[in-house]
Structures are given as C-alpha cells and as structure tokens.
Image (cartoon, grey):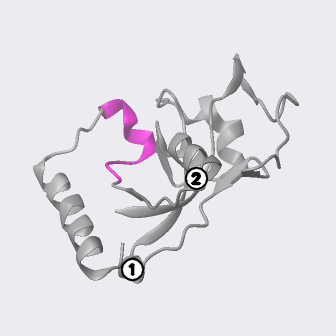
Amino acid sequence: MVCIIDDYFGDIGIAAVNQFASVFDLGLRNQNELPFKNEILENESPIPEVLADIRKVSGITCNAIPNQLNLIANSYAKNYPEVMSREGANMLYVCQKESVRLLQLFYVIDWIENVQNAIAPNESMANAVNKTIDLLFKESHL
C-alpha cells in the first residue's frame, strides 16, 4: 500500500513510432496552467498521521497500461513515477478543479516490467487494503 502525492497524465497527446508528444510538448496546454505545476498534479491534501508509515510515491496515469516501458519513456522521464494507474490523475484533476480534498491510496500489485503477466488482485490483497482503510477511519478524524 502506498500513498500517491503527485500524478500526471502519461499518454494524453500524440504517439508516433517510438515517440510521444504530450499536450504540453505540443503547446496545446501551458505546463503551469492550474492545477498543473510543470505538467504535474501535486496533491496538497493533508495526509493523516495514521498514514505516516505508508510510503509516499509519484504516479503516472495511462489509458492503456503499456507492456513495454519504452512506449511511455518520454512521459516517464518527466517525473520518474513509482506507480502506474488508469485513473489516478483523472481523479486528482477533478478533485483539484472542484476544490475537494483527496487521499490516494494505491495497492501495488506488481512491477511495471511484469505487466504482461496481468496479475489480478486476490483475497489476501483485498484484505490488506481493507485493514488499512479500517485503520485509517478508526484512528483519524476523517
């Protein structure tokens, strides 16, 4: 279980053979246009003390999880994310635009390099997530 503190869109733009240009690279969006800071969405919501021991990480959001890292290498090099999802930056963007606090907890299933194995969550993974969420709500003022 990790807590995502910043996230960005890894595949919104134009892809060509071994090349990718984001909407920022193309000049279609300003890289510092609110809520972006240098193309990145930073989650400034306070993190409850109960999550102090949970690792804080950067994320990348892609509509399709690539099975080869070089397909998103240009985007990856902008923030060196530690986790990848399909929805993280989308949710963070909407929450920031609507001034809603968001706490992004993410359960890591496997390394990006192993994505072709398509590991699915199992019962023990779900139980670990449920325990963390229960602890969060019991010991915090959320």
Residue 139 locus on image (x, y percent): 27, 81
Q: Is residue 47 above or below residue 12?
A: below
Residue at the image position 38 percent from the left and 40 percent from the top: 114
Residue 75 belongs to magenta span: no
- Of 83 and 117, which appears nearest the observer? 83
* Residue at the farthest top position: 17
Residue at which label 1 appears: 53
Residue at the image position 35 percent from the left and 53 percent from the top: 108
**Region in magenta:** 108-117
Residue 48 locus on image (x, y percent): 43, 77
Q: Is residue 88 above or below residue 23?
A: below
Residue 99 locus on image (x, y percent): 60, 55
**Can you tell which quarter of the image residue 31 is in?**
top right
Residue at the image position 34 percent from the left and 62 percent from the top: 1
Residue type beneath disc 1:
Asp
Q: Badge 1: how crowded within 10 Å, few (<14), some, or many (20+)?
A: few
Label 1 to label 2: alpha-carbon separation:
19 Å
Residue at which label 2 appears: 81
Q: Is residue 124 above or below residue 24?
A: below
Asked whether disc 1 touches disc 2, contact meaning CB atoms under 8 Å apart, the reply is no
Instruction: Give SS at disc 1.
Output: loop
104 left or right, relative to 122: right
Instruction: Give SS at disc 2.
Output: loop
| Magenta region, main secondary structure | helix
91 left or right, relative to 137: right
Residue 116 belongs to magenta span: yes
Residue at the image position 52 percent from the left and 61 percent from the top: 101
Q: Badge 2: how crowded within 10 Å, few (<14), some, or many (20+)?
A: some
Q: Nearer the viewer, mark 1 or mark 2?
A: 1
